[in-house]
Image (cartoon, helix red, strand yellow):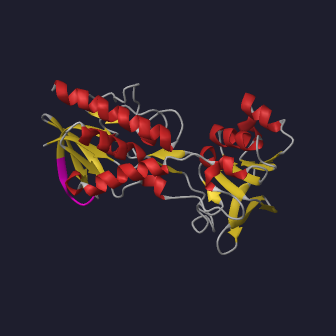
Amino acid sequence: MYDLIILGGGPAGLTAAVYAIRKRLDVLLISPDLGGKTRWHMYLPDNLERFQVITGDDLVGRFSSQVEYLEFARKLERAEKVEAIAGGYAVVTAEGNRYEARAIIVATGAGAVKLNVPGESKYRLHGLAYSAVSYAPLFIDRTAAVVGEGELGVRSALELAQIARRVYLIIPSLAVLDNTTGKKLQASENVTVLDGYSVKEIRGDETYARSIVVTRGGDEVELVVDVTFVELDLLPNSECVADLVELNERRQIVVNCNNCTSRPGIFAAGDVTDTFTEQVLICIGEGAKAALSAYEYILAQ
């Protein structure tokens, strides 16, 4: 039985693993990959430069290198289920293996809700992105489109409105804007709201998305933009512990300030939790906190 098993190899999971190793815990990281979403980078055309936005890529890369070096401390597998057992927990993977530990850190992340339209897969991170909070600063004085259904889309559009030349917000109805943020957005002269429209296609050249096609009834409009942000929602990968810990209405794992869940011995960190916002640097900090909390828990057993 391990001291600690960490599920997920993104920023939170990798950070937790490195901290746990430094605490001399017998730790195992289980993840289908190392790096998570940080392995994906926005392709920047023309004169856009990466230095305009702060990322945690370099730091995550260092953590990943340490875990890659310690082959005994990782399994490139996908966790499917966590079960309570005497003295701890068992993790069952999609590959059919079973691993046991006294404590668990869940850092399995979250995935963005997709449009499922032609061109989406081709232009992912080539003019099409799922996080305005991460990439908006790259598009100062540019034209952007935001596809949203609720508060996430409205907030993203408002953030872009502060820096972009023109912002198109595609929403299902004006009811989405019936709040303080929405009213402020409607008052912005550089924002065009397209209510009742749905996305039909993402179009572009060989390397980059150049426009988004939206429809409403028989009306079809092609918007020429520099970037499209899909801000529908995030789907937390919390299924493996859904029967063990408390989840909120969005299926995120509920944690306290020490990254403890509702179940002793299970901790959680990163985008799979109800922590504030989706950012690499925040996930790194949450991963460190979770590892230190797990360490204190294990010492007390």
For the image, the number of numbered tags is 0
| Place of residue 82 in the rendered image (x, y in percent of width and height, measured from the top left) | 26, 43
Magenta segment main secondary structure? loop
Q: Position of residue 278 (x, y in %)?
A: 52, 41
Q: Is residue 219 magenta?
A: no
- Is residue 97 found inside the magenta-colored segment of the image? yes
**Residue in view at x 38 percent, y 46 percent:** 108
Q: Position of residue 172 (x, y in %)?
A: 71, 47
Front residue (pair 167, 254): 167
**From the viewer's perspective, is 285 left or right of 195?**
left
Image vertical order of residue 69 relative to residue 273, above or below = below
Query: How far across and how far down the image is residue 115, in percent?
Result: 60, 57
> Residue at (42%, 49%) from the top-left corner?
60
Which image quarter holds the N terminus?
top left
Residue segment shown in magenta:
94-99
Q: Where on the picture, by quarter, is residue 27? A: top left
Q: Is residue 38 left or right of residue 301?
A: right
> Residue shown at 84%/45% (left/top)?
190
Residue drawn at the location 30% of the way across and 31% of the way down: 292
